[in-house]
Image (spheres, helix red, strand yellow):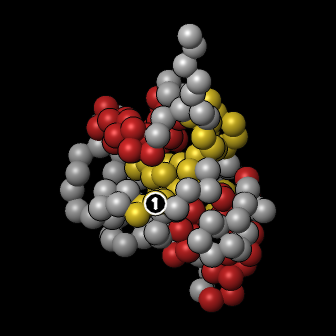
């Protein structure tokens, strides 16, 4: 008898602002691919820090993967990737080698002490909305019902310029 595993579509945010930021993103994606099939990646964006402002700029990217891992299994796996990549917990929103966050998991709505899906800060983070709107402009937020493109347009209308720009090797 063969086990029948369900595959789940998951959007994951990646961020790095310490060390070789580009290599940190690439290595994290490669590690994620050991438990998931990479469907697509956004461009890489240079973004100002959020939360704690006195730190280097981040490189941020969103990936869409297909995985058989359930949400808590995926969270544990991503935390393991962060640690194996050299991430050391310091202050909340402080500098880091790599940060991996589950943004969406299919159209699941989940609230647990250690995991909330969709990620509760999506609407407040231009560094998430820009790459999400790039690769999934019509993706509806399962709670709000608005698309990523609409959410980004709303964010842009309510905030001053984001300071976000596309990454290039000259940065």
9 relative to 137 in the view: left or right: left
Tag 1, which secondary structure? Answer: strand
The x and y percentages for residue 27 are 48, 31
166 relative to 24 in the view: left or right: right
User: What residue occupies the far right of the structure in this picture?
Assistant: 138
Residue on which disc 1 sits: 110
The foreground one among 35 and 156 is: 35
Question: With respect to residue 166, does 124 lie above or below?
Answer: below
Residue visible at 34% across and 51% down in the picture: 96
Can the viewer see residue 12 in this picture?
A: yes
Residue visible at 72% across and 60% down in the picture: 139
The x and y percentages for residue 78 are 40, 40
The foreground one among 9 and 49 is: 9
79 relative to 2 in the view: left or right: left
Residue visible at 55% across and 74% down in the picture: 123
Can the viewer see residue 16 in this picture?
A: no
Residue visible at 47% across and 70% down in the picture: 121
The foreground one among 53 and 136 is: 136
The x and y percentages for residue 2 are 57, 13
């Amino acid at each position: 008898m063969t086990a029948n595993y369900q595959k789940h579509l998951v959007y994951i945010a990646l961020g790095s602002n310490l060390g070789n930021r580009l290599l940190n993103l690439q290595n994290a994606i490669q590690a994620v691919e050991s438990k998931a099939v990479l469907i697509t990646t956004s461009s890489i964006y240079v973004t100002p820090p959020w939360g704690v402002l006195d730190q280097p700029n981040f490189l941020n990217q969103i990936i869409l993967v297909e995985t058989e891992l359930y949400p808590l299994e995926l969270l544990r796996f991503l935390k393991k990737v962060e640690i194996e990549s050299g991430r050391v917990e310091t202050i909340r929103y402080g500098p880091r080698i790599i940060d991996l966050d589950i943004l969406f998991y299919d159209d699941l709505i989940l609230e647990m002490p250690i995991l909330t899906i969709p990620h509760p800060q999506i609407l407040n983070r231009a560094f998430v909305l820009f790459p999400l709107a790039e690769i999934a402009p019509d993706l509806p937020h399962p709670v709000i019902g608005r698309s990523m493109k609409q959410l980004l347009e709303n964010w842009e209308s309510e905030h001053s310029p984001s300071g976000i720009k596309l990454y290039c090797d000259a940065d």
